[in-house]
Image: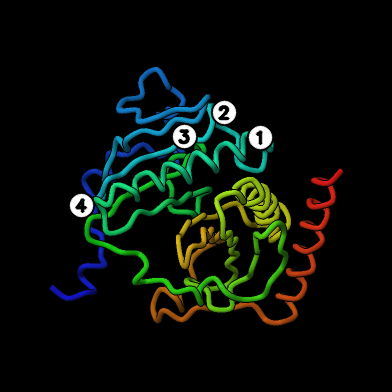
Amino acid sequence: MCLLEHQQLFFSSALISQKPNTIRNQNTDCPFCRTEELEEILAREGNIIWLMNKHPTLKDTYQTVIIETDVCTSDMRQYSTSHMRKLMRFCLDKWQEIEGTDRYRSVILFKNHGPYSGGSISHPHMQIIGMNEVDYHQNITMANFEGTNAFTHNGVELTISAYPIIGFTEFNLLASADNQYDTFADMLQVLIRYILNGFHKGCNSFNLFFYRFNDKIICKAIPRFVVSPLFVGYKIPQVLMDIDLNRMTKDLSALYSAYARSELA
């Protein structure tokens, strides 16, 4: 079997058809709200719950879900600072816990938000998946996280990708130490507010993807719209023109400078 085949995940269309979808159909009962009916809970901290995915659609994987809050209609923009920090530490710790078992070629942590994100449940949640046959490091390089520096605070750096994975605008947060978790969480929340409130008036969706590279913890935040046909058909990513990049960098620098001042107040 060739390497390319090893780097593919196989999914069950039958199981996908059984999954509830509260994004497309808001009248569907939310499975994450009925906490008394949840099964195979792995850990919980307050209203944050880690459990097995009830609809494991991917072959040769270990699929889990982290329910972020018991408020179905909320999102990361609205979390208190303390809850956002607790959530990030919980998610990163559980991700590292599965990685530490050495049972999987790689383990991914990610989040879908909104109708263009690829998600099906609107209740805020993240996912951790251990993959038996796929190593995500073979598809990604550090170049995908490098680019224009928009802000650096307490050792956590925000960049805008010069060589994005899918194209257009991809933001990256890079931290080099575990003791930067709180700053990492704070800067991620500021970034999500920017994506949904200031980046583009029509943006209501994003993805978060987490990586470990060169002793760094990295989060790539991607505003989501309809995928470019040039990428779908030709794998040609599109990037920002300098004038747009400069404007965006200036806006983000102002936002994060205000955040840093408030932290010191």
Quadrant into which the N terminus falls: bottom left
Q: CA distance from mark 4 to mark 3?
A: 23 Å
Q: Residue furthest top?
A: 36
Residue 210 x %, y %: 48, 56
Q: Position of residue 234 (x, y in %)?
A: 40, 81
Q: Residue at x 48, y 63 (%)?
A: 215
Kindly identify the amino acid type of the residue bearing the numbered disc 4. Asp
Q: Amino acid at mark 3?
A: Ile
Q: Which residue, given by chain and number where applicable, does mark 2 sit on?
A: 71
- Of badges 4 and 2, the one in the foreground is 4
Residue that label 1 marks = 82
Labels 3, 1: front one: 1
- Horizontal placement of 200 versus 176: left or right? right
In the displayed structure, would residue 203 be above or below residue 63? Answer: below
Identify the residue position indicated by label 3 in the image.
Answer: 67
Compared to residue 151, the image places residue 93 above or below, namely above
